[in-house]
Amino acid sequence: MTKINFNSSLPIVILSVGLLNHVMIIPLVLDVAGRDAWIFAVLTGVLSIGWAFLLYWILKKKKTEHLFPWLANRMGKRFTKVICFVLSVYLITIILTTAKDMVDWVRTTSLPETPSIAIIIPFACICAVLAYSNLKTIAINSAILLPIVIVLGIFVATGNIPEKNYDFLFPLFEQGYFFGIKSMYYIANGYLELIIVILFQHHLSNGEAIKLKTVLGMMGIITVLILGPLTGAIIEFGPILSSEMRYPAYEQWRLLTIGKYIAHTDFFSIYQWIAGAFIRVSMAMFLLPDLLRVKTANMKKGILLVLAIMMIIINVIPLSDIHFYTFLKNYYFLGTFFLLIILILLFTVVAKMKPKRKVVPDETIQKRP
């Protein structure tokens, strides 16, 4: 097994969670909370500190053992299979919702006359090829893509400074202190999704030496990823207009001009969107057969082929973007929030339990004398 260190996996996490925060969560948060969205993002970021300590503790207890034997050695194989099935379904939903949202965005903003199937087939194939490789290959691709994504993010943030009106951030709580508190469910998904680190920890060469400051740093990065474009939408378009936008982060690109004669810089956003979706989907596709402990190459190819076909089907069926948005808002993110909370509590309980059998360094299991 080719392993990487924890720092090498950070670009994967940043691109994956960054797409979730920038593209999928921000429209929902603005829709629900309006002007108060940014303060609820700050509050969620403060609460994430507790999650950082808990995640760090779970990682230290789990070490570099694969999730399946780690759970089975404490809770039994039957219960472990149920948990792995639930996690598999969760990873599949990440793949399908990301692919669907990406294709809808591309058709809405850039290729309105292009059939969805012409967009999703090459995307699904490329993701499947990357997922078939290994975590190191995904990490290298992420490390290549991320710097340009960061530079473009800084570019749009600084380039729109003349258009920003910080007075739009206040006053707060005009409709009550608890108006928009539901937005914290959506924002929390970006933090709770770091549970995927537990899924690939056994691929890390320094999985037992993860530092608390690194986990806290990840929480800080996620806070910036959600707070930056969220406040940017409010101060550039106002709380009312921004809450009515389907893709507020994209609209910030449309607002950007370079001097007097260069406009329509929104084509830069295509790179950011596709890069994030590419890594997010590829990582989820990689984790699924790894979670199921698939041993043969043909079986792994079969699983990736099925996932690619599922991505194509979800984009071919006549599901409008309005219905998809309603599904994300009313069902998906609320459901994943409670699911991830339950899984985290479960992993916390398991981490406190003593193993039934002793795990030796070569990852074999021996009975205690």
Image: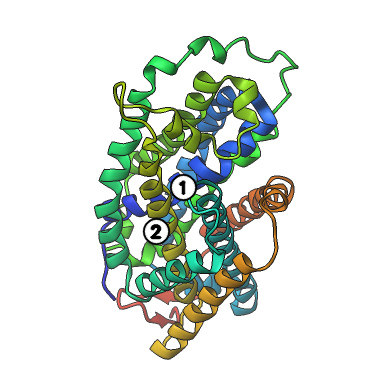
Q: Which mark is residue 330?
A: none
Horizontal and vertical percent position of residue 260: 31, 21
Say if 184 sits above or below 332 in the image. Answer: above
Q: CA distance from mark 1 to mark 2?
A: 9 Å
Say if 60 sits above or below 122 in the image. Answer: above
Residue occupying the point 54% across, 80% down: 306
Decide: marks 1, 2 in contact (CB < 8 A)? yes
Q: Which mark is residue 19?
A: 1
Residue 364, visible in the rendered structure: yes
Horizontal and vertical percent position of residue 335: 69, 52
Residue 215, visible in the rendered structure: no
Horizontal and vertical percent position of residue 152: 31, 38
Which residue occupies the foreground of this view, 89 or 117?
117
Circle 2 SS class: helix
Residue occupying the point 70% across, 28% down: 180
Horizontal and vertical percent position of residue 148: 27, 44
Amino acid type of the residue tagged 2 in the rendering = Ile
Q: Is residue 57 left or right of residue 260?
A: right
Which residue occupies the foreground of this view, 122 or 8?
122
Amino acid type of the residue tagged 1 in the rendering = Leu
Residue occupying the point 41% across, 68% down: 127
Circle 1 SS class: helix
Say if 26 sits above or below 340 in the image. Answer: above
Residue occupying the point 37% across, 53% down: 275
Badge 1 or badge 2: first in the primary sequence? 1
Pointer 1 local density, CA inside 10 Å: few below 14, some 14–19, many at least 20: many
Q: Is residue 369 left or right of residue 177?
A: left
Q: Which residue is mark 2?
A: 279
Pointer 2 local density, CA inside 10 Å: few below 14, some 14–19, many at least 20: many
The quadrant in which residue 348 appears is bottom right
Which residue occupies the foreground of this view, 244 or 98?
244
